[in-house]
Amino acid sequence: MIIREACVDDASAIARVHVDSWRTTYRGIVPDDYLASLSFERRERNWQQLLSQPTERREFIYVAELEPGQVIGFATGGKERSNHPIYKGELYTIYLLQNYQRLRIGHQLTLAIKNQFAEANIYSMLVWVLADNSACHFYEALGGQKIGEQPITIGGATLKEIAYGWMDTRVIPKMPE
């Protein structure tokens, strides 16, 4: 498994993972017509634009590859977006193709983002996740504490998001050797 910083050449592969993982992970949670409307082409354009920004100005973006060129997951993070008084970093997204979930790859991606935060002297982090997403257990297993919730509207449906927070990301367990 290779975990590395993403580059603009990864835009198409990230878009594929993004759309495919939404369609499998959020089936039964997000309205079906919204999932069907997701576009690989639109996502690829969005990722190309984001990945074209200078590295020092953009969010942290990492990919997981089985081998070079075979992206199976990604994670993004950066400064916490709501100016929370405690949590300074935010894990924005983490997505894996369905066949590669629950194999500790998400843990590796989370550690990559956490390590980038540490380089920027950021040691607190939060993540927002849909309450009905099975990934809630993943964040709890990594020591995330529920710190809030809010409504979010996706595809015309009002859903609930839960925030998990780490006051000190140094407590997130390292990968076993």
Image: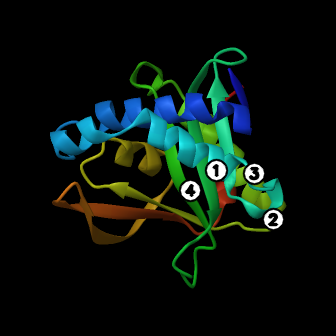
For the residue marked with disc 2, what is the amino acid?
A: Ala
Residue at 54 percent of width and 36 percent of height: 106
Give the CA separation, mark 2 to mark 4. 14 Å
Tell me if residue 176 can be seen.
yes
Report the number of numbered marks: 4
Of the two numbered discs 2 and 4 on the same chain, state the one appearing first in sequence.
Answer: 4
Mark 1 residue element: helix
Residue placed under numbered mark 1 in the picture: 49
**For this rendering, which residue is in front, 26 or 101?**
26
Q: Which residue is mark 2?
A: 120
N-terminal-most mark, 4 or 3: 4
The CA distance from mark 1 to mark 3 is 24 Å
Which is nearer the N-term, disc 2 or disc 1?
A: 1
Please tell me whether residue 48 is drawn above or below residue 161 in the rendered image: above
Amino acid on which the number 4 mark rests in the picture: Leu
Mark closer to the chain start, 4 or 1: 1
Q: What is the quadrant of the N terminus in the image? A: top right
Identify residue for label 3. Answer: 115
The residue type indicated by label 1 comes to: Gln
- The residue positioned 63% from the left and 73% from the top of the image is 88
Query: How many residues crowd around disc 1 within 10 Å: few (fewer than 14), some, or many (20 or more)?
Result: few
| Residue 149, quarter of the rendered image | bottom left
